[in-house]
Image: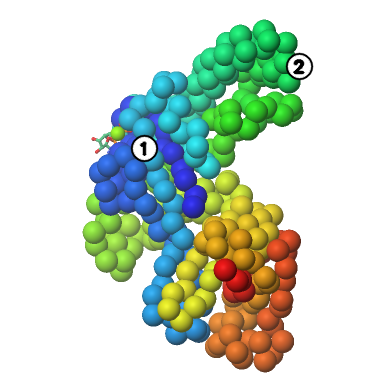
Amino acid sequence: MLQAGIVGLPGSGKTTLFAALTGGHGTVGMVPIPDERLEPVARAVGAAKVTPATLQLVEVAGTGPAMLGNLRKMDALLGVVDGFSGTGDPEADRESLELELLVADRDHVERRLERVRSQAKSGDPRLREEVAALERGLAHLEAGRPLSEFAEPLPPELEPLTTKPLVVVVNGAGGSDLKLEAELRDLDEAEAAELREGPSALDSVLRSLFEAADLITFFTAGENETRAWTLRRGGTALDAAASVHTDLARGFIRCEVIRWNELVEAGSHAEAARRGQQRVEGKTYVVEDGDVLNVRFSV
Ligand SMILES: Nc1nc2c(ncn2[C@@H]2O[C@H](COP(=O)(O)OP(=O)(O)O)[C@@H](O)[C@H]2O)c(=O)[nH]1
Ligand SMILES: [Mg+2]
């Protein structure tokens, strides 16, 4: 499941964005990801239940290294800048936000460096290498550059914020009107579309996030449940199976693949198979956006 953290300066509209997307007021919430292919796929197989892919959203109530440190496990960051008050400067705020992320990483690398340096006194060559890499990473950050531009490998558990995809939403009438979207949430779709005079700004926010995080969607199309899932681009059939259920990955035998539109046109799995549109693939098959997968497995 995709996890994204909301970041922004105080008063930029983080809580408003969280409410618009989740309908809730907590700090962690779920957001269904709209996909216009899901309904037709579900209809083709006569699914009793249709389940969209979901995004888990986390809001942190401020900036500063300690707050932002809660977002190290996120796949992507959703930045909000004030474009509604008339007193903010969206471009300058965006830069401030990027600087906050950089400072949080500097703090984090510094702390790790201190710890590994003292461990490296034992003489372990791997730890001494890590010390050297962290020192170079720290110098890079201190020069004001994000770790996305740092060419060397860093320990994976470091999870720097400045390597995460960042989508910035300009909150206001000229960009995405989050306050309006939060208010329209409880209306039905037709009424909301009339009031906002167009499609929801949130859809394009979610789409940008999806693209920035380099994700694709695949489907499982059963009669009981048809469902959309997210997968990192380049992921294999085995990765896809694992995201559905660990049993599917553990007992993976093979995977039947149909393109979503061919399934819709054929009207059923059986007819698509009869037309020769169903392929059989193995664990290493690289899943494509819009694939409908049926994993055969044994437990
Ligand atoms: N006019 C207007 N006010 C907004 C908009 N977004 C947020 N606000 C208001 O700005 C204030 C701060 O918003 P909030 O979401 O709490 O910001 P946070 O501190 O980043 O969580 C609240 O009073 C919101 O009602 C907007 O798009 N337009
Ligand atoms: Mg808030």
Mark 1 Cβ inside 8 Å of ligand 2? yes
Rendering coords of residue 67 (x, y %): 39, 26
Residue at left offset 67%, top offset 92%: 274
Residue at left offset 55%, top offset 63%: 247
User: Quadrant of residue 47 in the image?
Assistant: bottom left
For label 2, the crowd category at 10 Å Cα-Cα, with few meaning under 14, some 14 to 19 and many 20 or more, is few
Determine contact: label 1, label 2, CB under 8 Å. Answer: no
Asked whether 126 or 213 is in front, the reply is 126
Residue at left offset 53%, top offset 15%: 111
Three-letter amino acid code of the residue under disc 1: Glu
Asked whether 59 or 92 is in front, the reply is 59
Q: Which mark is drawn over residue 160? A: none
The residue tagged with tag 2: helix, strand or loop? helix
In the image, residue 272 above or below residue 100: below
Distance of label 1 from label 2 (alpha carbons)? 40 Å
For label 1, the crowd category at 10 Å Cα-Cα, with few meaning under 14, some 14 to 19 and many 20 or more, is many
- Of tags 1 and 2, which is closer to the observer? 2
**Figure quarter occupied by ligand 2:** top left
Mark 2 Cβ inside 8 Å of ligand 1? no
Rendering coords of residue 38 (x, y %): 48, 71
User: Quadrant of residue 287 in the image?
Assistant: bottom right
Residue at left offset 60%, top offset 89%: 270
Q: In the drawing, does residue 138 fall left or right of residue 27?
A: right
Three-letter amino acid code of the residue under disc 2: Pro
Rendering coords of residue 148 (x, y %): 65, 31
Rendering coords of residue 142 (x, y %): 61, 13
Asked whether residue 142 appears in the rendered view, the answer is no
Q: Which residue is mark 1?
A: 59
Asked whether 68 or 192 is in front, the reply is 68
Q: Which mark is drawn over residue 125? A: 2
